[in-house]
Image (cartoon, rainbow, N blue to C red):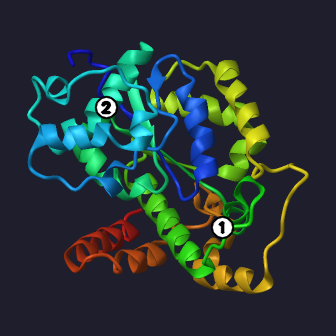
């Protein structure tokens, strides 16, 4: 892959499918960026065997990857000229998808992909661009538990802890890597999608094809009941509300108050969340938070 643009990837994450799906549709409609419709879920599904060709064949056989409708190319051929590393196994299908669409850059969308930002940044370096969208937790829970008009059983405590961890991780990364990681409040985006899409294009280094990109958003609105302004808006049980409010604490209104406003970055919450990780990584990340807290 000699094209210098091919390894300028754009990744999309966040704690809910509707927000990440909206961004995928918008960014993936740009003439320079290919983002598969179906989620990749690479980090959640692959158990490396040590045989790169075997692992790539397994990836290409995943049902959602098959729906990308990649050209028939042997896994060994896809890895020719590479070191067969996990990075190359990950990138090969995405590069093939972009090439099939005639686009120079690839991206991917998977909910909670922000958990792997540090790995992706290590693989692709300074050219990495990561966009995380975060909706306020209560409407996110309502949307998640009523997807496609059907009631789904969602544990409010498990949901809230996952939402909180995702939001805090995003706030931390956006503060540490502002040129590579950006955090978008869902509510602000849907209130002024043209302005936010222009900002996204600038951040990702994409041509500002605003009208074309936003045309996809109308389809997302028609297909998904989670958008602000829809007539059908189910409620939330009082006990679920209380449990979620208790778990997310001051983040109950979402991440926007912490993005460039007078409110400080919730460093204590970030440090607390990091301590839940593995002992060594927790100590390292908590230390980095404490150091940043002392900076002007």
**In the picture, which quadrant includes the N terminus?**
top left
Q: Alpha carbon of mark 2 to alpha carbon of mark 1: how far?
A: 33 Å
**Position of residue 243 measured from the top left corner of the image (x, y, whole percent):** 66, 85
Determine which residue is flagged by label 1. Answer: 137
Count of numbered badges drawn on the protein = 2
Left or right, 127 with respect to 212, comes to left
**In the picture, which quadrant includes the C terminus?**
bottom left
User: Can you tell which quarter of the image residue 85 is in?
Assistant: top left
Left or right, 98 with respect to 216, comes to left
Residue 13, numbered circle: none
**Badge 2: residue crowd in 10 Å (few <14, some 14–19, many ≥20):** many
Sequence-first disc among 2 and 1: 2
Determine which residue is flagged by label 2. Answer: 93
**Position of residue 215 measured from the top left corner of the image (x, y, whole percent):** 71, 25
**Which residue is found at the position 68% from the left and 68% from the top?**
152
Left or right, 217 with respect to 234, comes to left
> Closest to the observer: 284 or 59?
59
Disc 2 is placed on an element classified as helix
**Position of residue 89 measured from the top left corner of the image (x, y, whole percent):** 21, 38
Relative to 91, does residue 70 appear above or below in the rendering?
Answer: above
User: Can I make out residue 215 in this image?
Assistant: yes
**Which residue is found at the position 14% from the left and 28% from the top?**
76
**Badge 1: residue crowd in 10 Å (few <14, some 14–19, many ≥20):** many
- Front position among marks 2 and 1: 2
> Closest to the observer: 207 or 242?
242
User: Can I make out residue 11 in this image?
Assistant: no
**Which residue is found at the position 45% from the left and 53% from the top?**
174
User: Can you tell which quarter of the image residue 65 is in?
Assistant: top left
Relative to 71, does residue 275 appear above or below in the rendering?
Answer: below
Disc 1 is placed on an element classified as helix
């Amino acid at each position: 892959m000699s094209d210098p643009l091919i390894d300028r990837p754009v990744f999309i994450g966040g704690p809910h499918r509707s927000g990440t799906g909206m961004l995928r549709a918008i960014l993936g409609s740009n003439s320079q960026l290919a983002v598969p419709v179906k989620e990749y879920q690479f980090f959640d599904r692959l158990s490396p065997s040590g045989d790169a060709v075997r692992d790539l064949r397994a990836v290409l056989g995943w049902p959602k990857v098959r729906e990308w409708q990649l050209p028939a190319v042997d896994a060994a051929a896809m890895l020719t000229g590479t070191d067969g590393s996990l990075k190359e196994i990950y990138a090969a299908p995405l590069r093939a998808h972009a090439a099939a669409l005639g686009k120079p850059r690839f991206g991917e969308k998977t909910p909670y992909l922000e958990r792997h930002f540090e790995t992706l940044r290590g693989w692709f370096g300074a050219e990495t661009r990561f966009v995380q969208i975060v909706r306020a937790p209560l409407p996110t829970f309502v949307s998640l538990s009523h997807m496609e008009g059907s009631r789904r059983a969602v544990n409010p405590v498990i949901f809230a802890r996952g939402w909180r961890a995702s939001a805090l991780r995003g706030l931390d990364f956006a503060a540490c890597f502002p040129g590579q990681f950006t955090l978008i409040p869902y509510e602000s985006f849907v209130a002024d999608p043209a302005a936010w899409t222009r900002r996204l294009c600038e951040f990702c280094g994409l041509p500002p094809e605003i009208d074309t990109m936003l045309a996809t958003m109308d389809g997302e609105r028609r297909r998904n009941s989670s958008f602000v302004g829809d007539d059908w808006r189910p409620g939330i049980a009082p006990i679920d509300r209380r449990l979620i409010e208790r778990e997310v604490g001051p983040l109950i209104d979402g991440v926007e108050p912490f993005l460039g406003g007078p409110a400080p970055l919730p460093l204590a919450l970030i440090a607390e969340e990091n301590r839940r990780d593995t002992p060594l990584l927790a100590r390292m990340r908590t230390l980095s938070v404490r150091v940043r807290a002392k900076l002007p």
